[in-house]
Amino acid sequence: MRPRLNLNSARLLVETGTPEGCRSAISRSYYAAYGEATVLVETAGRVVPPTGKSHALVRDLLKATREPRLRYAGLMLNDLYTQRLRADYRANDPFPENAVNVRNAIRMAATIVRIADKVREDARWPEIAEDLRTIVV
């Protein structure tokens, strides 16, 4: 499955207007962005372990790169991760049940997906990939 397809689910879920739909939409948005960011990092030649630690690794790599678009994507991914935690683990938190917040999360995730695509298409991709491979986090 292509991780970006989670955005389709997120868009459908927010339209339910239910608290659980909104919370699930935030989670799907995060996984769309995280999954595409992981694909980018792995395409660069970096090994991403199949553990919970991979989430921080991917965010940290993006934030540490010299490529400004990826640093921005890393910051947004950090925000989405925090929103996902609120949606999945903070049942009394109203933030993830607000459709405006959810639509913003979906937009952020879509932006991260677009950035990943643009960076891979960039003529400087080999240099960017080398940077991602050699960053120590």
Image: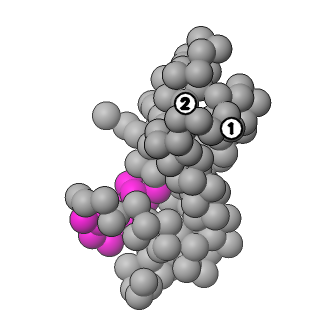
**Furthest residue toward right:** 100
Look at mark 1 in the image and give the residue it sits on: 95
Q: Nearer the viewer, residue 96 or 79?
A: 96
Q: Is the residue 46 above or below the residue 97 in the image?
A: below
Q: Quadrant of residue 70?
A: bottom right
Report the quarter where the N terminus lies.
top left
**Range drawn in magenta:** 36-49
* Residue ID at (63%, 70%): 71
Q: Does residue 36 appear in the picture of this structure?
A: no
Measured as percent of width and height from the top left, residue 29 is found at 53, 38
Nearest the camera: 28 or 119? 28
Residue under label 2:
23
Tell me the SS state at disc 2: helix
Residue 12: mark in rendering: none
* In magenta stretch: residue 133: no
Quick check: can you spot residue 18?
A: yes
Residue 91 vertical placement versus 67 (above, below) = above
How many residues crowd mark 1 within 10 Å: few (<14), some (14–19), many (20+)? some
Residue drawn at point x = 40 percent, y = 70 percent: 57
Q: How is the image coloured?
A: one colour
Looking at numbered disc 2 in the image, what kind of residue is underneath it? Answer: Arg
Q: Say which quarter of the image contains residue 26.
A: top right
Picture coordinates of residue 8, whole percent (x, y): 52, 24
